[in-house]
Amino acid sequence: MMDISLAAALTGLLAPLLAFALIMVLLRGRPHLCAGLSIAAVGLSLGSALLLLARHGASPNPLEYSVQWMVSGDLAVGAGVFLDPLSLLMMVVVALICLLVQIYSLGYMAGDPGLARYYGFMSLFAWAMLSLTLAPNLLQLYVFWELVGLSSYLLIGFWFEKYSATQAGKKAFVMTRLGDVAFLLGILLVLAHLGNLGIREMNTAAVAAAFEPSTLTVAILLIFGGIVGKSAQFPLLTWLPDAMEGPTPVSALLHSATMVAAGVYLFARLYPFFSLSPTAMAVCLAVGTISMLLAATMAMVTRDIKQVWAYSTISQLGFMLMGLASGSYFAGVFHLTTHAGFKALLFLCAGVFIHHFETNDMVAIGRAGGRRQLIPLVCMTLAAAALAGLPPLSGFFSKEAVMAALAAQPNPIWLGAGLLGAFLTAYYAFRLIFLIWFPDRVSAETAPENTDAHGHAHAQPRWQVLVMLVPLVVLALPTLGLGGLQTHLMSFLAAGLTGPEPVLPHLPWLPLTASGCALAGLILAWFEFGRRRAPRIGFAERSAFWRSLFAERWYIDRFYRALVDRVIDRGLARLCAGGDRHVIDGAVDGLGRGTVASGKAVSGLHRIMIQHRLGTMFAVIIFLALYFFI
Amino acid sequence: MHISPTAFPWLSSILFCCLGGLITILLLPGRRHQEIKWVSAFFSGLTLVLTLNLFLLYDQRVGGLQFVERVSWIPSLGITYFNGIDGFSLPMLLLSGIVFFTAVLTMWELEHRVKEFFALLFLLVTGVFGLFMSLDLFFIFVWYDVSLFPMYLLIAIWGSTRKEYGAMKLTLYLLAGSALILPGIVYLVVQSGLQTFDLTALMRADLFSPFEQKLGFFLFYIGFGILAGVWPFHTWSPVGHVAAPTAVSMVHAGVLMKIGAFGILRLGIFLCPLGWLYWAPLMALLATIGIVYGVFAGLRQTDIKYVIGYSSVSHMGIVGLGLATVSVEGLNGAVFQMFAHGIMTALFFSAVGYIYDRTHTKALDELGGLSHTMPVASGYLVIAALTGIGVPCLASFWAELTVFIASFRVYPLYATLAVAALVVSALFMLRVLQRTCYGPPNERLAHLGDVSLGLGLPRMILVAVILLFGLFPALMFELIQTASIPLLNGLPR
Amino acid sequence: MIVPFNHVLVLSGLLFFLGLFCAVVRRNLVMILLGLEIMLNAAAVAFVGASLRWQLMDGQALVVFIIAVAASEVSVGLALVMAAYHRTGSVDPRQLEQDG
């Protein structure tokens, strides 16, 4: 008999797949049915996730169900589910946010001609992401890792008539693919040495014996390459801001809360394995820090509301990696959880504004009367405060945990970078908030009727507004309250970890310093954007050099563009295509032409009358006969 | 090996089914297009059913050669009509059956010289089936030539872009290949001193000296390698794909290129295992160059069919790399990749063919926005491209993964390069999609209709096959294993 | 064997040279074909003689082949001659030169 946990897990995993298949094959013509089906499926997933959490939340032993999916020689690929505190937590987070975002999309995407396709892809994503979360071995994880990348590609390019959207989708796919290549090579390396890719097997200390230390470091760094790609870390970070071309609910779900967090999840998943190599951990820490700071600077200058949150996503993912890489499993995972909540909230709020005002420009939204959208704005402020790490919101606690882990590092530079990051985060988050709360021109208030008429030109039915607001309120709850669960979560997660969690020193000055930094950022933002006679120009924007550096994303994009153009398109590709046409084909065609030419030359001999030829032939034969036989 | 005369000759019945179709078509008057198409569909469908039946009847627990039929043909020369299938040839038969049936359905809208087209197509496919099931070197060679000769006419008469050049180039290349294969066969048969063309009799490990095996393998490798698109003998393939009409491209890229790889496996590896071991590093090198070169050359192309042609070169490189690993996983992956790539390119050409029939262009610059007017047709194109990139849950992913795993153990550098080529292949496939399917609606194409259910049928079948084997790769791997494990176990080390 | 084998060979040789002479010298396409036929028959005579000499049937079998080949060759050849005549209005092989 199948036991209830397995049945629940399978139902939770397969319901979205079934929904996807039904939608794509049969129901494309009936968008509302598709939406209902997709939401019901992901609701089922959430239900089973909660059931599993309730059943296994307290048990210290992870549960693994696996079957052989395919065998080829020595290679056996298993498929199954792996239930431990980390995967259960992640599953609940993913299912919850999927459900909320899909409900929200009912309002946001209403009337879109591709609604059925949208919900189909959303179901595909839900299936892939949930299966990734529960994967018991690295290969299954890789399979779904690729599939979430695929659904990300499809959803970014959802509005395929927009060139920028298809471009962004392609860029996202190719850049994450670059990381995935490293990931795959890492998997191959581990497989070659260990002969096994089970996550439980990889997370034992005995693994170190199977590798030479340098090989182990290389393997870990290669796997980390996948994380860099998926979580948009330095140097593969520029696809994420572009990915904002997709519909906003997609950004909220994939490109902030869940899919990009899959990289961090993988790190946490393999945390004991990663911590076998201190060198690799140091590299990870450095990459996390660099991405965190770079993205924060980029967020300071853009005026696109979604871009700000995209950069902040990169930055916060960097924070999570810093937490994990500096040795605190709990800090990283905790920040992942809280971030999923408040960042989804930020995006969904931004979506309300974008939907209502039909612009992404925060200044324009402010001028058009953004502050009259009271519920979204309050929610967004709340979430921004959480993002900035202000007490008593959830972000404060999780960021605190990361800071504590950084403080435990021997080198103070990491903590310094973390504090700087906290300052910048608060600054750019509240720059946006203040620009909407306190616009410079009050055109909105001088002519409220006018904008109102404009705003409701595409008046929505009441229920659509409502389905967009309910998820906001639901997501605001964890943003407010999740911090209080810190100790519960800590003991819950610690149960799943094989090694002991390092006891971090309790530093009473640290929370004060960190929130002081955040507060300083907030005050600077207020000074520059909030107060009545504020200049409304940031300190980073004053200097043309810094502004263009940040706005051009530190020229990383230019570099890639040039690389693709010069080296790949005009270099290697041209070399190969040209080589094909001129060298190989040239040689072959030359051979052909040579044959024809020599044939022509010889055929001159044939230009005599047929009987002469016959006579010659016989003469030759007779001479040959005489020569050989006499 | 048992010869049971009472058993139903399933294999010959496939051949007779093709021949029956050929003869029936020849007997029909040429202007009755509909009847000819229905007859073609019937006979090709019957072939597909027969191959499926074999797939289901083959006993995987026993493995080895099954459905053996043996009739002495020219005893004084040791030529027998000897058929049988194992875990290597069965996937190929299934592939041929699927591609053949879908290719016939794809050409449902053909109006020009319908009778001749389908007659030649049937002749071509007879050769293909014969080659995959034959175990007699003489017959293998005959079937090989039977399957090559109609290609020239099919391309030269019904083709498009530079069709005479493409047809001539293809024919010359393939004849050059057979000019190497025939000496190879004759050389080995003479050297064996057994007066027989029976493959199973010649497979005895101690029969040939190491030198003979090296020479024989080399001849087969180059000779069949030309057909398999091994770099640097690949240039006929993109040109040929581009020139050929849709169904011929499908059969050509889907099945004929597999004949090359299958020939290397069946003749080269089975007869000359020592030669295989000796030449494996060269195979791996050429295969890797092909993989990397194919994707980069594909990046520069402006004609969709050229793009697919070069991606085929790259994908066939993966087959070569798998064969070069000399391991069970590598062989499994290579054969699976042959199957998966066959289905995938068939789908690709089928989708492109549909679009070409409507828009009359294959140039990337002139297309765009197809998803607005033909969402379903471009959906097929998207699925084909994604399979080409190696997205999981689509058939070729597993094949590539196994080949990478196997080759990483033996040739880490080559495997790394091959894996890295995935990025570029993603780049160029997605570019194709971006320029054809996506973008603002194209007014020039706005009036065109989408695929109807009937015309969509062949693509649907192909997509279903891709998904089936992508989701359940074990179906295929377990079958191939029945042949690859004994082969590797019998290898002299 | 009544007739010595050498005599058969001489006969066949003479016939062959007659045919050769006819084929090379006569400026008429039909006569060239005729010459070819004679040469084939010369070979056939030699085969028959050899078959008698060694008491093997292979020679006779080959003669049957030769007759069949000769028949088909003549029919195709005459058809070609007709075609040439239609094009050039003569059966002179020299006329074929100019048309190439």
Image (spheres, coloured by chain):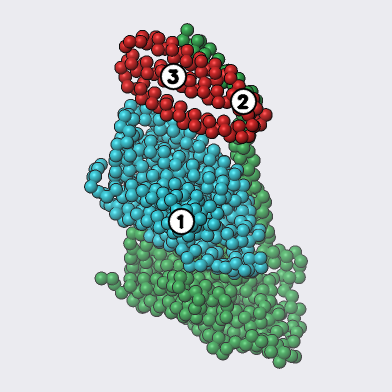
**Which of the 4 image quadrants contains residue A615?**
top right
Q: Name the quarter where the N terminus of chain B is drawn.
A: top left
Q: Earlier in the sequence, mark 2 or mark 3?
A: 3
Q: Which mark is residue B387?
A: none
Label 2 CA crowd tier, 10 Å (few <14, some 14–19, many 20+):
some
Residue drawn where x is 46% and y is 37% of the image: B221
Q: Is residue A118 above or below residue A183?
A: below
- Single out the residue that lies furthest toward the top: A630
Type of residue at label 1? Ile
Give the number of the mark in front: 2 or 3.
Answer: 2
Q: Chain of mark 2?
A: C
- In this picture, residue B457 sits left or right of residue A53: right
* Residue closer to the observer: A219 or A103: A103
Say which amino acid is labelled 2. Pro
Dot 1 corresponds to which residue? B36
Q: Which SS class for mark 1?
A: helix
Could you confirm whether marks 1 and 3 are on the same chain?
no
As measured in the structure, the alpha-carbon distance from the residue carrying label 1 to the one carrying label 2 is 47 Å
Placement of A358 over or under B187, stated as above or below: below
The spot of residue B403 in percent (x, y) is 44, 49
Residue A448 in which image quadrant: bottom right
Residue A565 in picture, x, y percent from top left: 66, 54
Front-most of residues A515 and B429: B429
Mark 3 residue crowding within 10 angstroms, few (<14) / some (14–19) / many (20+): many
* Colour in which chain C is drawn: red
**Residue marked by disc 2:** C93
Residue, disc 3? C43
Q: CA distance from mark 2 to mark 3?
A: 25 Å
Is residue B370 visible in the rendered structure shown here?
A: yes
Callout 3, which amino acid?
Ala
User: What is the chain identity of the residue bearing mark 1?
Assistant: B
Residue in the image at 60% along x and 32% along y:
C84
